[in-house]
Image (spheres, rainbow, N blue to C red):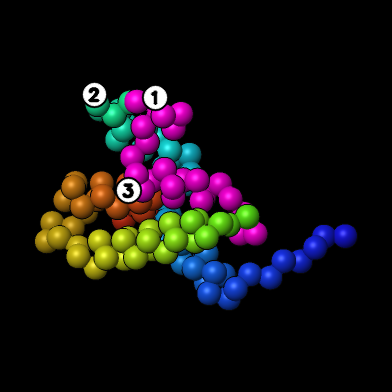
Amino acid sequence: MAREQRLDPEVEELWDDFHAQVNVPSEKLRQWLLTRGSGEESFGADPDLGLPEPGRHILRVLTKRKVDLTPEDIEVMREAVDRIQSLVDARPPRGNADDEWRHSLLDLGHDVLVER
């Protein structure tokens, strides 16, 4: 018999917000982060191949089930939602044509070109 685990309603809401804001599939995010982390100084001895932060943590959370979240994962989700919303709110005059702004969002798993 499956055991029903109840999560804090705030965590449930955060989970939904996180997955609404992080709209890049995990494999696409990983590929993007590997591309971003492939600079000359980026690859180190780290088993994650030098994936940029905080994208690596966001990617880790994307692979988890709600019931497996740690307090650190919850904090990563909170920070990701806040950072994505701040960047979206600070949309530059050139909008989607501003590569630096768009890449900052992609680093967090949010693609402004994806329709909701």
Q: CB of mark 3 within 8 Å of CB of mark 2?
A: no
**Circle 1 is placed at which residue position?**
45
Q: Considering only order in the chain, which callout, 2 or 3, is on the residue closer to the N terminus? A: 2
Task: Say which residue appears at 76% left-offset and 66% top-offset.
Answer: 4
**Magenta span has 19?**
no
**Circle 2 is placed at which residue position?**
40
Measuring from the top left, give residue 6's x and y in whole percent.
68, 70
The image quadrant where one finds the N terminus is bottom right
Q: Considering only order in the chain, which callout, 1 or 3, is on the residue closer to the N terminus? A: 1
Name the amino acid, label 1: Ala
Kind of element beneath mark 2: loop
Measuring from the top left, give residue 51's x and y in whole percent.
37, 36
Q: Examine the rendering and report whether any part of residue 97 can be seen.
A: no
- The answer for how far apart the CA atoms under marks 3 and 2 are is 21 Å
> Mark 3 or mark 1, which is nearer to you?
1
Q: In the picture provided, is 101 more to the left or to the right than 113? A: left
Measuring from the top left, give residue 83's x and y in whole percent.
31, 61
Q: Considering only order in the chain, which callout, 2 or 1, is on the residue closer to the N terminus? A: 2
- The answer for how far apart the CA atoms under marks 3 and 1 are is 24 Å
Q: Residues within 10 Å of mark 3 (few under 14, many from 20)?
A: many
Q: Nearer the viewer, residue 85 or 56?
A: 56
Q: Nearer the viewer, residue 91 or 8?
A: 8
Instruction: Give the magenta range.
Output: 44-67
Q: In the picture provided, is 88 more to the left or to the right than 110? A: left
**Circle 3 is placed at which residue position?**
106
Task: Say which residue appears at 58% left-offset and 76% top-offset.
Answer: 9
